[in-house]
Image (cartoon, helix red, strand yellow):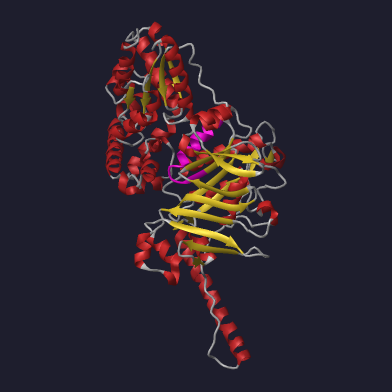
Amino acid sequence: MKIKEVEIKKFRSIEELSINAGNLVSLVGKNNYGKTAIFDAIQVFFQKKKLLDKDIHMFSIKELPEISITFENVSDIDIQLLLGRSYDLEYAKSLNGVIKINLSFTEGQFKAKYFLEPKNIQIPTRTLLELLPDIKYVSSIRNPEDNTFSKKNSNLRELMDLLIRNNDTTDETITIQGKELKIKDIKTELKKSEDSKVSTLSKELSTKFQNLVGHQALSIEIKVENTEIIHSHETKIKDHDILNLNSDNNSFDIQTSGTGMQSLLIIAILEAYIEHNTGDQDFILIIEEPEVYLHPSLQRKIVNILKEISTSNQIFISTHSPIVVSQLKPKELVCIKKEKGITKKIVSDPVSIINELGIKPDDIFQHSKILFVEGPDDKKLISSLINKLVTTQEISAEKADILKIVDIGGIDTLSFYTNARILDAMNHAHLTHYNFWIMVDSDGNSKEEVRTQIDKNLQEFSKIYKEENLFILEEYAIESYFIDENILCELFDTLDIEKTKELCNKYHTIYQDAKINRLQSGKGSFQNKYKPKNFFLNKENIFYEKTWGLSIEEIKTIQEVQRQWKTSNIDHYIELLPLNVLESTRLNEIISHIKTIFDKID
């Protein structure tokens, strides 16, 4: 279940406003324009916040707020539970998994009432809340007074809970007095013990109750609804520069540190979540100004992390950072402004956003030949391969200096649009002196799908865009090219060549099978489970066992790869590998494209 549309009426500075939501939504606007009001309205709908007097639009109690959210991908069972006695099979089928739920309030106590539109069927609040996706919220103001780790709903506690809960598994085992026990079996035994206790208590209470009412027609029954093992966690930062590591004096609560330090921990938590995520999740993450007090390089990093999480979950952010916005697609942006105290949505066309936020092009003015790539790792790999070709005299050093490689985060981002506008203007002034190429991963799509989307994005720049200058790679991402026994065994001599070959072949087979069936399973699920990055991330054994079907021996091999692999060392790996080895692997595809580009450079 995910949000498709949010409609807000009469809430704070919002008179009436609607937002279409994809997997990633970014609210863009200046301070005090109403971004927080939109997020708070969503939280009120999910009952994470209560409606207060200050939330009433223009403080007029004549018209109380209304918040409507349209959900898609709603299962038939969830629809049946929501409709309850009003359930009608034909009507349920006609919804096609899309429902619109309206939240309104009664005067006085602001009692919340939920209705399924358009039939105005009232939905029990408890039933709805049990079915809604989990929602996590991180405010832009992260201070010790409001958000200590000890508080139930603090910013960082919400994220830590997400990480720890995701890391829990009922298949986990512990050893007690030499006997291995599963956690789920321990819970079962605990429940049996508690059932026995409450059964005795039920009989005792029933006897006393029946004596009081004077008959035995009624009795008291106590049941154990659920048995959980609950852990309470405390998270601190330990300063290893302080000599006495056994003392509590060298550790401190993260919330007593600055906002910048907290933002770094948020990045670390989200990175850890990606590594530990073993399957499809269903939560909504709201982060106000994720870029707060972060260096520009870390702003780009957190955007990339949020993009990755959004393949299987829904992300809402607010920002007025040119760096963050430049990494996003225009369709992911919702631009708002205030007119006479009223928050309004405005047209978010690329030109107006670029002008409003001052998004700047990369340093391309001194270069007439430019290669656009999608990410920093792509740039590092291609630069390293060019250096290798220069070293082996496949291309000249002079030509290599002419080509500028620019990482723009994606061909459909505002960063690329900004650079393309500059190239278009310079080409017009210098009579086609400038030329550019594009090299992109397939991201699990077919080449035709990628080409169609890029052609659509570049319609405005038809005078400078040449179709033959577009290189769409066969593989999902650059990590795919390193899933090769010849490369891995050349780099890491502890690997067994036959076991590594078997593992690499198995990955490529399950990837291709999953790619064929990605429409049935869903693109987000396919990307989350089978992306090549999972080959190098240290995920839980259960992920590789259940999702990829790896044996214990294959899991040991992949863990040996992960123990030694570092994506940040890609340039070093290319330097170590002989050119003939590189050309004998899938990397020859990229090498061939590079040679084609330099053949066209005079």
Residue 309 shown in magenta: yes
For residue 282, above or below residue 26? below
Left or right: where 264 falls relative to 74 = right
Q: Quadrant of residue 96?
A: bottom left
Position of the N terminus, as image quadrant, is bottom left
Instruction: Tell me, yes or no, whether the highlighted magenta stretch contains residue 212.
Output: no
At 55% across and 29% down in the image, what residue appears?
Answer: 323
In the foreground, 75 or 263? 75
Along the line of sight, the residue nearer the viewer: 77 or 258: 77
Where residue 128 sits: x, y (%)? Answer: 50, 62
Relative image position of residue 262 (x, y in whole percent)? 63, 38
**Can I make out residue 494 in this image?**
no
Q: Main secondary structure of the magenta part?
A: helix
Which quarter of the figure has residue 597? top left
Quadrant hosting residue 581: top left
From this view, report whether residue 327 is shown above or below residue 94: above
* Residue occupying the point 68% across, 65% down: 108
* Quarter of the C terminus within the rendering: top left
Q: Is residue 302 above or below residue 398?
A: below
x, y percentage for residue 197? 55, 75
In the depicted structure, whether residue 314 falls above or below residue 565: below
Foreground residue among 34 and 230: 34
**Magenta-tinted stretch:** 299-315
